[in-house]
Amino acid sequence: MKRSKAYWLRLKEDVPYNDYWDYAILYELLPVQEYEFAPADKLSKTDKAVVVFPARHHIDMVDQLNKELSKVKKVVLFLMGDEEHLFPVEEIKHDDIQIWIQNPEQGRHDDYHKLGTGFTPHVDVLGGEEYEKTLDVFFSGQITHTRRKEMWEVLLQMEQRPISIDVNATRSFTAGHDSADYIKRMAKAKVAPAPSGPKTQDSFRFFEALECMAIPLADDIHPKSGKDGYWEWLFDDAAFYPLVKDWRSAPGYTADMMVEYDRRVQMITSWWLMKKRQYRKEIQKFLDIESDNITVVVPSSPIRAHPSTDIIDETIASIRHHLPNSEIIITLDGIRSEQADLNDQYNEYKNKVLWRALHHWHNVVVLVHEEHQHQSGMMHDVMQYIETPLILYVEHDTPLVTDKEIDFDACIDFINEGEANTVRFHFENVIPDAHKGLVMDQDGDFLQTFQWSQRPLLSTRAYFKTIMSRFPIEARCFIEDVWHGVVMNDWYEDGILGWNKHRLWIYHPEGGIQRSYNLDGRGEEDKYEQKFE
């Protein structure tokens, strides 16, 4: 994939290009796998680019900025760090521009793309392993205005309660714990009060809490004007986290969040992953950036091996071996009543998966289902998020092999030429004798078949729409258990014309055809009753 141009632009020699804490979120929205950044004092003429500009340090240089932006035909501009709202964004002139404003102001910046302060670079010390949640509440920061004083009085009262609470009032910004210690304490907390900053309700702390899977108690009241509604305005979304209008309600919110911690933090973290994804997509669409043409879907559900993530770790690693940058969407099923005894270990597993999506895996988002959906229900839901023409479907315990090549380009060409709707990656090295009657002719590295299996397969989004149209929204079942019969019946009733409805092939190169394997997550456990309609 060719990377898109991006610039850290400054117009003053004494201003850093990108050495700012509030730039940390940009490294997720504009990942190095997709954007080639360069520091710049001037821009070069080009068709399209991302430009990141420290607006706070250039409030009197909008004319010079306009001159530089005129060299780029299509531009995404990030105006960063202007917490005081002094930069005259209304004076920016460009015919084809998408403007993102960090720390935006309600009423003034309604029509721009809005970006919060984001998290600090210190979240990088957290690594891939999640932290045990040994703290109920954590806060460390300055007590500088009325809203914070109200919060602090309540936190001191909460210290007398039988909860694990770690609170610290600091003399100045960053004067408390060292940054690594601070973020690790946050990562051990279930709840993180996030009082308003000095100019808006926004703060690093709110976003640090999201990255640490601590539930933020988000201050909803402006420290000076008393205006509310900032967070839902910033995100254009209903809040999944508590919005605090009166800090005296914090003990009640905290008690509720502690009781419901797993459920609430899972929904909040999934929302946050999808929100960052939404931002990335908006930038890509505006710049007409060609994304990878495959979306990988990995369904996962409760198994006895949980809370271990060994199985899904191996599966994700195998996908990344072949497809380093394709988006992966993990769908986590709700738990069915027959598996209620797995609830605690499955919650721990889900938390680990979400943590990995935040801090370890690249370009992975997670959809969490509170109620049991099964494969069919989860696939119905995830289809709305898939924009690529192709889907790679890989169950959580069926990795791709990593010791043999999979020529995905050849598979994609075979599909794009109209020869196939689906190419399956076999889990054995040869076609078993019992299945030889289910295969037909060979075309190069591809073998015709009328046997549907939910082993890893590459298929078109259009064909998956056809598949899911046969499953009622209320169905709760394995896709294979229905679609296997549909494909086979079409073959037996109409022969090659019936097969043409599905155009199903097995990837069959010379030298052994195994391209996936089974870690058997379900083990000896029988299938539970399914609902087909």
Image (tube, helix red, strand yellow):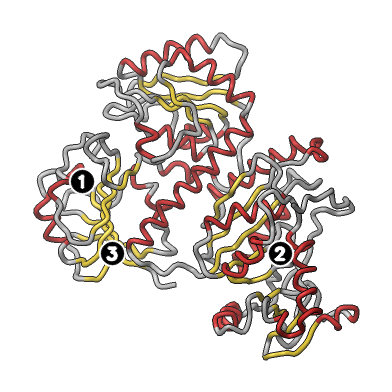
Residue 397 lies, with reference to residue 210, above or below; the image says: below
Residue located 23% across and 51% down the image: 53
The residues bearing labels 3 and 1 have C-alpha atoms spaced at a distance of 18 Å
Mark 3 vs 1, N-terminal side: 3
**Label 1: which residue?**
55
Q: Nearer the viewer, residue 108 or 272?
A: 108
Mark 2 vs 1, N-terminal side: 1
Q: Is residue 329 left or right of residue 88?
A: right
**Label 3: which residue?**
49
Q: Are the residues tagged 3 and 1 within 8 Å (C-beta)?
A: no
Residue 287 lies, with reference to residue 262, above or below; the image says: below
Q: Around disc 1, counting alpha carbons within 10 Å, would you say few (fewer than 14), some (14 to 19), or many (20 or more)?
A: many
Residue 305 lies, with reference to residue 454, above or below; the image says: above
Mark linked to residue 370 = none
Q: Nearer the viewer, residue 7 or 485?
A: 485
**Label 2: which residue?**
399
Mark 2 vs 3, N-terminal side: 3
Q: Position of residue 526 (x, y in %)?
A: 88, 51
Q: Determine whether the residue tagged by mark 1 lies in a helix, strand or loop.
A: helix
Q: Around disc 2, counting alpha carbons within 10 Å, would you say few (fewer than 14), some (14 to 19), or many (20 or more)?
A: many
Residue located 56% across and 8% down the image: 160
Can residue 29 be spotted in the picture?
yes
Quadrant in which residue 430 is drawn:
bottom right
Q: Nearer the viewer, residue 34 or 280?
A: 280
Q: Determine whether the residue tagged by mark 2 lies in a helix, strand or loop.
A: loop
Quadrant in which residue 370 is drawn:
top right
Q: Amino acid at mark 3?
A: Ala
